[in-house]
Amino acid sequence: MFDFDRIIQRRGTHSSKWDNMAKLSGITAPDGIPMWVADMDFQAPPGVTEALREEVERATHGYYADTGTWSKSCADWVGKRHGLAIDPAWVTPTPGIVSGIGLILQALSEPGDEVVIFPPVYHAFRRVIPANDRRILDVELVLQDGRHVMDFDRLKASLTPRSKIVLLCSPHNPGGTVWTPGELKALAQVCIERNLILVSDEIHCDLLFDGKRHTPTLVAAPEIADRLITCVAATKTFNLAGAHVGACVTSNADMKKKLDARCIATGVASYNLFGMVATEAGWRTGEAWLNALLPYLQKNRDLLDQRIEKGIPGARSMRLESTYLGWVDFRATGLTSAEVAERVAKGARIFASPGQQFGPGGDGWLRFNFATPRPILEEALGRLDEAFKDLQ
Ligand SMILES: Cc1ncc(COP(=O)(O)O)c(C=O)c1O
C-alpha cells in the first residue's frame, strides 16, 4: 500500500540532507549518500499530500486562522497513541521544537541560568542554550549493558543555585533509549525537590521498535504537571521536518502565558499555513502509513546493526528502541575518530553525523540515519564493508 522502497530523487530539491551535504561534509562525489540530518527519504502519508494539494489548487494562501482544530488533532493523536490526555487549550504551536525550546528558555529563565542536558544528546540543544545566553550543565549518560541510563546522583551533585531547567530528550537521540516510567519518575522527583522546570522533548515518541511503548513524562509522573512542558510534533513522525511546526504543551497556565507572550513578542504567534495544514493532516490521516513504516524502519535497523558489526571488527551498533538514527561505537576498532571519519566520508562517500557533535560521550561514535529506501541502505552498507575490509 505504501512503497517505502521507491527511490525519490531529492538532489536539487532544496533538501538540506542532500543539497547541503557537499558544503557541510566536503563529500562532493556525485554518488555521496547522506545519513546525517533526521529526515526520511520517503513520501509523507497520502492524506498530507491531499491536504496540501487542496491548498495549492485553491491557491489563496492568506493568513492562517487558528480555529482550534490543529491543537485538537494534536491532543487526539497523543491521546490515542500514548495515552497522554491533554487539553487542546494547553497547546502552543511554535515554528518547530528547537525554536519552541528557545522561546521556553527566554520565557522561563534568565541569562546566565543553567540548563541541564544529558549528553550525548541532540546537538541543537548544545546550540540553542548558549545562543540564548544560558549555560549548559552537562550530566553525561552512563552506558549500562548497552543502554543509556541517567546518573541521578551525579545530576543532584551537579546542580547549583543557577540551575533552572532540565531539558530531557525522550526517547533519547542519539541511541534511541525509551525511558522507563521509573526513570521518568525519578527525574521528576529531582526536579520537584530542586525547584526545576522540566522540558520533555518527545518529538521521536512515535518511532518505536520491537513493540516498545513510549511513556510520556506527564503519564509517568503526573505530579510534575505544574513544572512540565512537553514538546511534541508531527514532523519527525510523518516526514514533515521542512514544515517546521511543533507543539509545546503545559497545563501550567502561568508558564503558558509567559511562553505565549514570547511568541507574540517574536512575531511567531501567527502560523505558517502550509506547515499547519500538513501537520494536522499527518495527525488526522497518517496512522496507517506510520503503522506500515515502523516495521520497514525496524528491518533497516536490523540490517544496519548486523552488517556493521559483521563488516567492521570492533564496531558495535547500539540496539535502538526508538528513532531511525543508528548510533555506532567505533572505539574498539583500533582506529582513531579521525581515521574512522576519513574512511566513512572519503572511502564510503557517506555523510554520517560525527559523535563529537552530541557532546561528552560522543567521541568515537557516528550516527547513521537509516530512514531511506532499502536499496540505498544496502548500497551504503556495502560501501562501509569495503571501506573497512582490511580490518577483517
Ligand atoms: C530531539 C529532537 N528535538 C527536536 C528536533 C528538531 O525539531 P524541529 O525541526 O521541530 O526544530 C530534532 C531533530 O532531529 C530532535 O532530534
Image (cartoon, grey):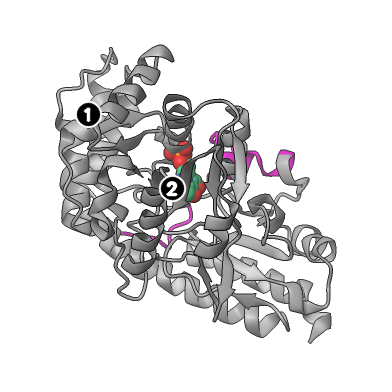
Task: Name the residue: 59% across, 53% down.
Answer: 158
Task: Name the residue: 73% across, 38% down.
Answer: 23
Front of the two marks 1 and 2? 2
Determine if the magenta segment contains residue 282: no
Q: Is residue 112 visible?
A: yes
The three-letter code of the residue at mark 1 reads Glu
Task: Name the residue: 37% across, 33% down.
Answer: 245
Judge whether 235 appears above or below 182 on screen: above
Q: Which picture quadrant has residue 72?
A: top left
Residue carrying label 2: 194
| Disc number placed over residue 237 in the picture, else none | none
Relative image position of residue 274 (x, y in whole percent): 33, 27
- Locate the N terminus by quadrant: bottom left
Relative image position of residue 324 (x, y in whole percent): 47, 61
Q: Is residue 11 visible?
A: no
Magenta highlight range: 1-23
Secondary structure beneath dot 1 equals: helix
Judge whether 326 appears above or below 306 on screen: above
Relative image position of residue 210 (x, y in whole percent): 35, 76
Q: Nearer the viewer, residue 332 or 155?
A: 155
Q: Main secondary structure of the magenta part?
A: loop
Q: Is mark 2 within 8 Å of ligand 1?
A: no
Residue 142 left/right relative to 279: right
Secondary structure beneath dot 2 equals: loop
The three-letter code of the residue at mark 2 reads Arg
| Disc number placed over residue 54 in the picture, else none | 1
Residue 352 left/right relative to 124: right
